[in-house]
Amino acid sequence: MSRNRPVLALALLVLFGATLGAAAADPPAVVQRGAEIVGEDLFPVFVDVDLRDLPPAPEWQPGDPVKEVPKRRRPPQSERIEPPPGPDPLVARQRALATEALPDLVLNIAGQGYSSVNPPDTVGDVGPGYYIQSINGGSGTQVIVYDKSNGSVAAGPFAMDTLGTGNCASGLGDPIVLYDEAADRWMLSEFSSSGNRLCIYISQTADPIAGGWCAYQVTAPSFPDYPKYAVWHDAYYVTSNESSPAIYALDRENMKACGTARAAQRFTVADLSGFGFQALTPADSDDTPPPVTTPGILMRHRDTEVHGPAGLPGHDLLELWALDIDWTTPANSTLTALPSIQIAEIDSDLCGLTSFNCFPQPGSSTTLDPLREVIMFRLAYRNFPDRETLVGNLVTDVTGTNRGGVRWFELRDTGSGWALEQEGTYSIDADSRWMAGISMDVQGNIALGYNVSSTSTYPSLRLTGRLATDPPGTMSATEVTIATGSAANGSNRYGDYSAMSIDPEDGCTFWFTGQYNTSSQWSTRIGAYKFPDCSRAPDFSLAVTPVAQAVCAPASAAFDLEIGQQLGFANGVTLAVTGQPAGTSTGFSVNPVTPPGSSVLTIGNTGAASAGSYLLEVSGTSTTGTKTRQVALDLFTQAPAAPALTSPAPGAINQPLRPAFAWSGVAQAGTYRIQVATDPGFLSLVLDQGGIPGTSLTPSSDLASNTGHYWRVQADNACGNGAWSTASSFTTVPLPGDCPLGAQPVAVYSYGFEAGASGWTTPSGVGTNTWAITTTNPYDGANHYRGAGTAS
């Protein structure tokens, strides 16, 4: 039931907008030919039942025992082959500044929780009328069907194994829920408590509640831990953590019709050397199916400093395989290693390479499992008219000090093979972010949901996102909270996964479910969100850069506008702007614009306007309506005056080692710069920090104790730097052992023992006398007297 680790359960290689394909050092493709046949043909068991009539799954009550999923793992071959890479190279690209609103809230409801098992393995998917969520329960998987229109419970909670027979009549968890959009069918799965079975249930009709189910069992050669499923045109693909990472192909053609399915086919790939738990992640199709000639896609990440190969500084890899299934002649099925995709450096060493304990929680010594080993469920595939895309994510150490961040990526295939379109690392503060789910909507917008936790943040669920027109590698939407945690999780086992999916009806609404904590026993949440401009109909998009600009009059301001084309939209877009400073002129280089196209907005004659901060609203109007974007313009007419220093007061003594510096604001200040030195000429600077937006600063590191300091502040703006303030002085507090200010230590007596003991003797006493002249680690000179383990 969750990641049992086999016994139960870029130095920047990709610049903005640049596309990098396969690693140059990739060897010729490695092809495995001929699948292992797993068992015999699969015969369905028809389960004609209304889910509303099933007995309810027992609810966990306070005081009931809590079951921890046993930890399974294979010993790693090595811990690390090269030093860690250091701070994540992509974090600086991600900005907390929001350029777009987050997707509109459609629904945010409580999911299942307080189960008697850790972790919950929270998962779900959305169909035309329902959202189905599954979690680990006390004796297998628990399932609830929600009416997606209002979040009400339509059926459940019921135990998934009530649909099973034989070994599958006793389920063990690790649930998966998928809606097969092309077939209009639902798939549920868990593994059995005995017999190494994958228990798979396909809805007989589009109605998951009253339409009935057909049940299948696949017997794996060993325990199929951490199974992850995907819908593809020619198969249901399943990956698992076994003695080697395993891949199964299931006969979707017959299973979706509840017919007799041909025997499953199986391949394996070689282990990575550094992980004790590992599995591939299959690509799962959204909306338009992949071309019938496209083989199934499998992926994992490779931190080369951990798993090799050595000598690849500056980047790591996404490894891909193509699984081409021949259902008529399995001997002709092939698994081909595709060229690896270079990505910027990742660091998989999060509290080690096998530890289940890493991310902190407030007020608790229990730290949480980072799930470093896999690309998280789902690896989402989308087929556009001009390209195929894959979006996925993994967790990485963003600081080198075990702080988790979400590395996300988009791959594209425009006909020449898979290549990296963009990547980013989402980490904007001291919280760890991980256990993420990611998907792309019909217009290429992306949403990313994830967990957060730290010493000051209880395990919670948050969401961010980006428009297709945003700068590459950034999640530019404001981060919002789906569920706020209020307690620490009682177990280090966390997750082991969450789920992000796309509503098949509109192709726009993201549905996310995951774990958070309101007590030591976990809860889950289900949130549905949609970008306001998203639509399946032809339309245009509007993007404006930069989102903020500062100019010094009489210079002009210029903003670049990109008008994107969605689904062939070709009607003219008329541009307009409001909110500009009075007295200025405005103009567009092209207006109207036929998508796809661009224009430049120029704000001129700024010398006739007053200094100030202005919020401009840029709009584009066409037959589908009006879209607006806001940008900021800071207009300055002269360099700022010198600030006045207010704290510490001139000549202040006993100031803390991190003084709270404060100064007066001055007109037309953009930002401020502070300098602190130990001399009045500011030649020996101990602090020199610019870009301060406000009128105060507390240093992030200590100043020297019992020391006189001098400080000054300067304001600046687009017109230039202002004059420095009059310098002021203060003295920091002395620490124990400091001499009084201005005093020098006086040596009352010193002796170097360079010429021997010279009259020094050691009296006899209790124990062994170990005092002797030695040259080991002297404070000064070559010799000193040293005693080890003296008793008196």
Image (cartoon, helix red, strand yellow):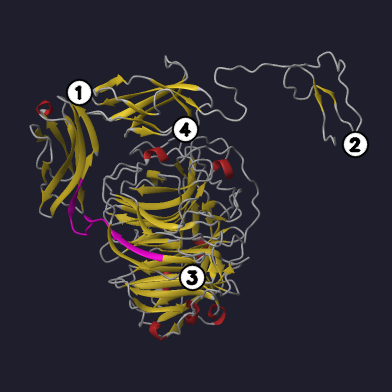
Percent coordinates x, y for residue 110 in the rendering? 38, 68
* Magenta segment boundaries in residue numbering: 525-542
Report, in whole angstroms, how far the alpha carbon at label 4 lies from the one at label 2: 48 Å
- Marks 4 and 2 in Cβ contact (< 8 Å): no
Which residue is the site of mark 4?
Answer: 658
Q: CA distance from mark 3 to mark 2?
A: 63 Å
In the image: residue 72, left or right of residue 363: right
Q: Amino acid at mark 1?
A: Gln
Q: Nearer the viewer, mark 4 or mark 2?
A: 2
Magenta-drawn stretch contains 528: yes
- Reading the image, the residue beneath label 1 is 638
Give coordinates of residue 541: x percent, y percent.
20, 49
> Which is nearer the N-term, disc 3 or disc 2?
3
Q: Are marks 3 and 2 in contact (CB under 8 Å)?
A: no
Distance CA(mark 4)–CA(mark 1): 33 Å
Q: Residues within 10 Å of mark 4 (few under 14, many from 20)?
A: some
Q: Which numbered disc, 4 or 2, marks the residue that appears first in the sequence?
A: 4
Per the image, the residue denoted by label 2 is 766
Report crowding for label 3: few under 14, some 14 to 19, many 20 or more residues within 10 A (C-alpha).
Answer: many
Residue type (three-letter) at the residue carrying disc 3: Tyr
Q: Secondary structure at mark 3?
A: loop
Q: Is residue 402 magenta?
A: no
